[in-house]
Image: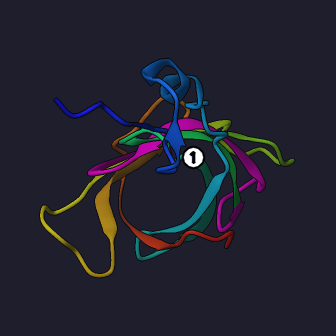
Amino acid sequence: MQEMEFFDPSGSPVESREAALAAVEPQAAAKTACIELHNGVVTFTINVNFDPNTYPFLVTGGTITAGICGAPWAVTGGSLGNSLRIDATRQGAGSCANTIIILGETLGGAQNPPSWRGTYGFDGASTSFQHTTLFRGYNPC
């Protein structure tokens, strides 16, 4: 009978199953994506910080930096995947709305470029305005 071999997550041999599992440490959520919301009248530039170890990707923070009244806005949560949800709170000055909810879904299958269509709204609403949001890449905008 062949003796069982054990490996850590990188493929290096280890002594036991316990040693292989002990080598598994949670990864820090350290990815940023650039997305742009378009509705025909406005364009919001959004940097989204997310946890790459989950799917759909859990949004952990970010900023809406342009195109929205009272910018910058702090992204406070949401998710990126086949569906999109972005929650944010205004940080800038002005007599603007205080919160935004952006919702979207992909059209199914592989899209090029990756994007979502849906609705967004302010101060508790999420269906006031239609949008298309484009994925611009895994770098800050």
- The residue most toward the top is 18
Judge by depth and name the residue closer to the eye, 38 or 50. Answer: 50
Prevalent SS, magenta region? strand
Boundaries of the magenta span: 65-85
In this rendering, would 92 be left or right of 128?
Answer: right
Query: Which residue occupies 36% across, 36% down?
Result: 5
- Quarter of the image containing the C terminus? bottom right
Residue 6 against residue 94 in the figure, above or below: above
Q: Measured from the top left, where is residue 140 in percent x and y?
A: 68, 69
Is residue 67 within the magenta segment? yes
Is residue 4 shown to the viewer in this render?
yes
Query: Which residue occupies 49% across, 18% down?
Result: 18
In this rendering, would 64 be left or right of 54?
Answer: right
Is residue 43 within the magenta segment? no
Judge by depth and name the residue closer to the eye, 100 or 47. Answer: 47
Residue to which mark 1 is pinned: 50
Is residue 102 shown to the viewer in this render?
no
Q: Which amino acid does label 1 sit on?
A: Phe
Q: How many marks?
A: 1
Judge by depth and name the residue closer to the eye, 4 or 22. Answer: 4
- The residue most toward the front is 1
Quarter assignment of residue 72: bottom right
Judge by depth and name the residue closer to the eye, 12 or 76. Answer: 12
Q: Measured from the top left, where is residue 125 in percent x and y?
A: 43, 34
In this rendering, would 49 be left or right of 92?
Answer: left
